[in-house]
Image (cartoon, grey):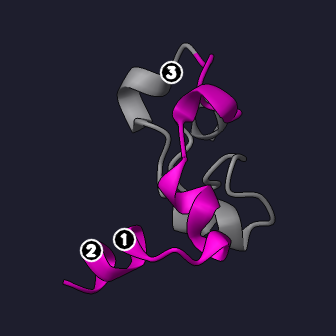
Amino acid sequence: AELTKIYKSPNQSFDPIKKFSYKNTACGKCLKFNICRGGCRGRAYLNGNIHGRDPFACAAHLENY
């Protein structure tokens, strides 16, 4: 119910969430995308960029560990 309110809100501060597409992310062209599915956008945002990598779920990054 709350997410529906956010999505229907005219508040433009929610536009990055409403218009989000993996095509515009670091993950969009990654060959490992089918494994991690881009991870969590919340963690990516907290790491500095909603379009960046989720450092805890990035399959390409984690394969080196």
Q: Amino acid at mark 2?
A: Thr
| Residue at the spot 40% in from the left edge and 78% down from the top edge | 6
Q: Which residue is mark 3?
A: 32
Q: Position of residue 4 (x, y in %)?
A: 27, 74
Depth check, front residue: 52 or 60:
52
* Residue 12 in view here: yes
Residue bearing mark 2: 4
Residue at 61% x, 31% y: name it: 27
Q: Tell me the amino acid under the disc marked 3.
A: Lys
How dense is the environment of label 1, judged by Cα within 10 Å: few (below 14), some, or many (20 and up)?
Answer: few
Position in image of residue 44 (x %, y %): 65, 59
Q: Are marks 2 and 3 in contact (CB under 8 Å)?
A: no
| Residue 7 part of the magenta-drawn span | yes
On screen, residue 55 above or below 60? below
Q: Residue furthest bottom?
A: 2
Assign the N terminus to one quadrant of the image: bottom left
Q: Which segment did they paint magenta?
A: 1-30
Q: How busy is the neighbourhood of tag 2: few (under 14 within 10 Å), some, or many (20 plus)?
A: few
How far apart are the two marked residues, 2 and 3, measured between alpha carbons? 31 Å
* Measured Cα–Cα span from mark 2 to mark 1: 6 Å
The secondary structure type at the circle numbered 2 is helix
Q: Quadrant of the C terminus?
A: top right
Determine contact: label 2, label 1, CB under 8 Å. yes
Q: Earlier in the sequence, mark 2 or mark 3?
A: 2
Q: Does the CB distance between marks 1 and 3 fall below 8 Å?
A: no
